[in-house]
Each structure stands twice: as structure tokens, then as C-alpha cells.
Image (cartoon, rainbow, N blue to C red):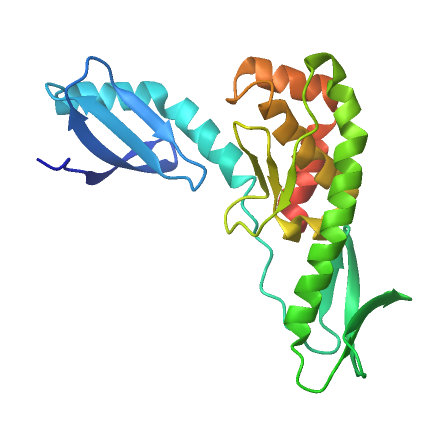
Amino acid sequence: MSEIISLQSFKFGSKEINYELSYQERKTLGIKVYPDCKVRVIAPIETTAEKLKVKLKEKAPWIIKQLSEFLSYHPFTPPRQFINGETHLYLGRQYKLKIENATQNEVKIYRGRLIVFKKDNASVENILADWYREKAAVHFQDILEKVLVLFRKYKIDSPVLQIRYMPTRWGSCTSKGKVILNPDLIKASKGSIEYVIIHELCHLVHHNHTKAFYNLQESIMPDWKKWKERLETSL
């Protein structure tokens, strides 16, 4: 028999929390918040609606905190146009796009302009995407090596860095020690990039967002909240 999942919601203060609810043979209520901000509630079969309501109200502050944490990693960069005069970001600074016809595809920064040299039928969007990815690979690796020494006492092996587009996250890490970063992060300031990388390295020590995790992040980067806020407001 397949599991029946229903979509539910409840109010906590001014917040409305949507969640998926299912019932299973278990003794305790389970709540999971996923990186895509989906909330899953698994309740014991005998749980009454009133008891479920009470339990969800108790856990609401934790659910909201988890949702807020995951949302801070969601890229909210507005769609850019690939036309002359449009602004594009690189390492926290805005540059005006200038497009010029050329015999080969190339990108240069000069006097506040992001100049894209393109062959006749080449896509400006694709040329810029490739350039961002190339720059991301270099800068992310440099920053990773710089901050990795701060974790020396935790005996973390040098992680493999992977650049990969992720629609809802700036970064993630695997249990095997791979750090995955969104190439769009190259549009943020270096401090914000450093914050995301430190955040992922902290997860190699503490896998969940526990108090120990935040204490470690604070000790490695005391001003992390400033860079987190800049990331959230600038992109």
C-alpha cells in the first residue's frame, strides 16, 4: 500500500507554514526541512488532529529558523538582459555591458565596463556564462585554500571543489568531502564567497545546523552575519 501524503498548513504568528503530512507506524513525530524549503511531517498513525496541532506549534520556531537558513542560500539574482548598457555583477561590483563584434569570443573588464567580444552568431549569454564559470573555478579554489588552514586542527582533508549550477543553493557539500559551489556566486563580494565556503567547510565538521556548528562558524569568521546579509541583499 502506497503512503498517502496530504498538503497542509498552519499559522504561527504572522507566518504560514506549508507542509506535507503522512502517517506511519512509528512512536514519535518526525519533522524534516529540506534545502528546497519543503517541510515534511511524519506522524504516528494514532496521532489526533489536536495533538498534531500542539506539536507543530511547539516546533514552529525551529521550522521557521530552518526555512530562513535555507532561504539565505537561494540565489535571487534578477534576470539580466544581455544588451548594451545592462549592468552585470562580478565580485560584488556592477559593470555595464558593452558588446563588440570580433573574430573570436572573449570577455574583458575595462574602466567599469564588462566588454564581450563576440563572433557573428555567438550568444552573449553563453559567452558570459562560460567566463563566469572560468573565473569562479579560479577564485573559489584560491579562497578555499586560504580558509582551509583555519580548519587545520579539525584534520579536514582538502576537499574536491566542484562548480555546478544549483537553482536553489549557493553551495553544498557531500558526506565524502566534496564542496559544490554555484558559479553565480562569483557575482558576490569576496567576503560573501568566503562566508559560503566556510559555511560548507563547517559542515564537514558538524553535519547539521546545531549550536556546535554555529559556534564553529563564529570562531572561524566572527563577522559572518555581515557577509551573509550582503549575499542576501546584493544578489
Give the residue at the far left of this rendering: 1
**Residue 102 or residue 111, whichever sits in front:** 102
Query: The N terminus appears in which quarter of the rendering?
Result: top left
In this view of the protein, can residue 204 be seen by the observer?
A: yes
Q: Position of residue 212 (x, y in %)?
A: 58, 13
Residue 80 image offset from top left, x and y in percent: 63, 67
| 198 over 80 or under it: above or below | above
Question: Quick check: can you spot residue 113?
Answer: no
Most extreme residue toward the right is 111
Give the left or right position of residue 147, taking residue 122 as reference.
Answer: right
Query: Which quadrant of the structure image shows residue 111?
Result: bottom right
x%, y% of residue 76? 56, 52
Q: Nearer the viewer, residue 103 or 63?
A: 103
Left or right: 68 in relation to 113? left
Quadrant of residue 181 in the image?
top right
Question: In which quadrant of the rendered view does residue 120 lie?
Answer: bottom right
At which x and y percent is residue 187? 71, 53
Query: In the image, what residue occupies the spot 42% across and 23% down?
Result: 62
What residue do we see at 77% from left, 60% from top?
A: 94
Compared across the picture, whether 232 is left or right of 147 comes to: left
Say which of 223 and 210 sits in front: 210
